[in-house]
Image (tube, rainbow, N blue to C red):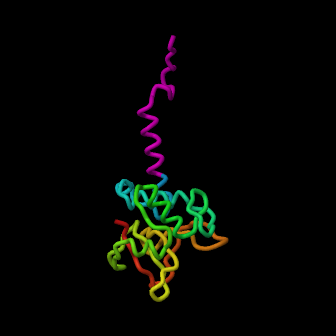
Amino acid sequence: MRMSAPSGSPALFGRAATTSLLTTAALAAGALVPGLPAPARGATVAGRVLEVVAAKQGSPYEYGATGPSRFDCSGLTLYAFRAVGRSLPRTAADQYQRTRHVAAAARAPGDLVFFHHGDGVYHVGVYAGHNRMWHAPKSGARVRLERIWTPDVWYGRVR
């Protein structure tokens, strides 16, 4: 015998209300975490990549690590794009070669930010908009959102 919940009980709301409540909470979380795209853009590949890297905020840096709980710079970008069904090579330099290069004026959230010295790429992060990026900076640091500190960067868009 199935018993019904008393009037006004949360059980009366059912699965649809629970789903709606969880969706509202997820969208509200995006407004609380800097660098996440607006909910309307969340369904795009770039928006989903930003959600993945933001969810890894605070994960420790470890040279050569590709997740799910520790990352180096290119391991974080590899992990984020793999999570949304896109393929990238392992190293920052190889990732730069695989992307469609874009000018700074054309950069968009979700693009990759490549730090270079001469022709050599040595660091990568995910552009979050407003001159900020998500990245796994260095040994002893954690994944974080940070202002891009130099104009000497290149941008690439994953195809």
In the displayed orientation, state which residue is furthest to the top.
1
Q: 8 and 14: which one is in front?
A: 14
Q: At 63% across and 67% down in the image, what residue appears?
A: 62
Q: Indicate yes or no whether the magenta region holds residue 10.
A: yes
Q: Main secondary structure of the magenta part?
A: helix
Q: Is residue 117 above or below residue 23?
A: below
Per the rendered image, the range of residues in magenta is 1-28
Per the image, is 103 magenta? no
Asked if residue 69 lies left or right of residue 89, the reply is: right
Residue that sits furthest to the left in the current view: 106
Quadrant for residue 102, please give it.
Answer: bottom left
Pinpoint residue 74: horizontal percent, then vertical percent.
51, 69
Give the position of the C terminus as an image quadrant: bottom left
Residue at x-position 39% and y-position 71%: 98
Identify which residue, 20 or 54, lies in the foreground: 54
Which quadrant would residue 128 be assigned to in this image?
A: bottom left
The reply, left or right, for residue 101 in relation to residue 124 is left
Q: Is residue 119 above or below residue 60?
A: below
Q: Is residue 12 above or below residue 26?
A: above
Could you tell me residue 1's position as x and y percent? 51, 10
